[in-house]
Image (spheres, helix red, strand yellow):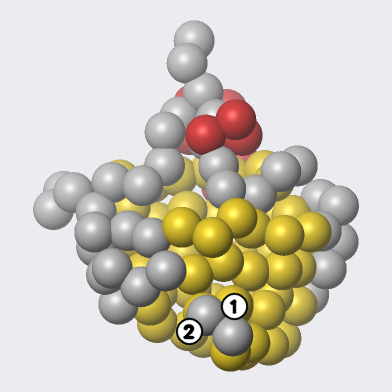
Amino acid sequence: MNDFPEFMKNPANKIDPGSQFTKDIEGFVFDGADGSQMAYWTNLVGGKSAEHTHDYDEYMVVVHGQYTVIIGDKKYPLASVDEFFIKKGTIHGGDSLPGTRMIHCFCGKRAERVKK
């Protein structure tokens, strides 16, 4: 597949791109009853994700492309089907190739939808 299925890209679930740590990223979010979120991202042009931290755990899997998690001076390159877990409070950033698609699960509210 070259993209997420259309049902996963419902405009009602579109993430506000201006609220993200990565420029030119397209995302959609789904909320869990426990306050967790699952986000589907496509980094259209590639590039850096600014260094940041969360007060909840984060799990990610690369669906297509390549993403490098950066924690301090360590780099963890991830390719398709590679997974990574980031404990809450860990300062991290990243870098991705154009067209990279990922799924992130947050043990807390992370993503804001586009305001209507």
Please name the residue that numbered disc 2 is placed on.
84
Residue 13 shows in this picture:
yes
Q: Is residue 74 above or below residue 98?
A: below
Q: Farthest residue toward the top?
A: 116
> Residue 16 is drawn in which quadrant?
top right
The residue that appears at 75% across and 77% down in the rendered structure is: 66
Q: List x then y, in percent, for residue 80.
A: 70, 84
- Do the CB atoms of the residues marked 2 and 1 lie less than 8 Å apart? yes
- Marked residue nearer the N-terminal end (2 or 1): 1
In the image: residue 19, left or right of residue 46: left
| Most foreground residue, 115 or 6 | 115
Residue at image x 51%, y 79%? 71
Q: Which residue is mark 1?
A: 69
Task: State the image coordinates of residue 9 (x, y, percent, origin top left).
Answer: 61, 41
Q: Residue at x 59, y 78 (%)?
A: 69
Q: Which quadrant of the figure contains the N terminus?
A: bottom right
Q: Residue furthest front?
A: 73
Q: In the image, which is nearer the foreground, mark 2 or mark 1? A: 1
In what element is the residue under mark 2? strand
Residue 4 lies, with reference to residue 15, above or below; the image says below
Rendered view: 90 above or below 75: above
Residue found 49% across the figure and 10% down from its top: 116
Task: Give the amino acid type for the residue marked by disc 1 in the picture.
Answer: Val
| Residue type, numbered disc 2 | Phe
Structural crowding at the residue carrying mark 2, measured as other residues with C-alpha within 10 Å and reported as few (<14), some (14–19) or many (≥20): some
**Which of these two is toward me, 60 or 7?**
60
- Answer above or below: position of 98 versus 33: below
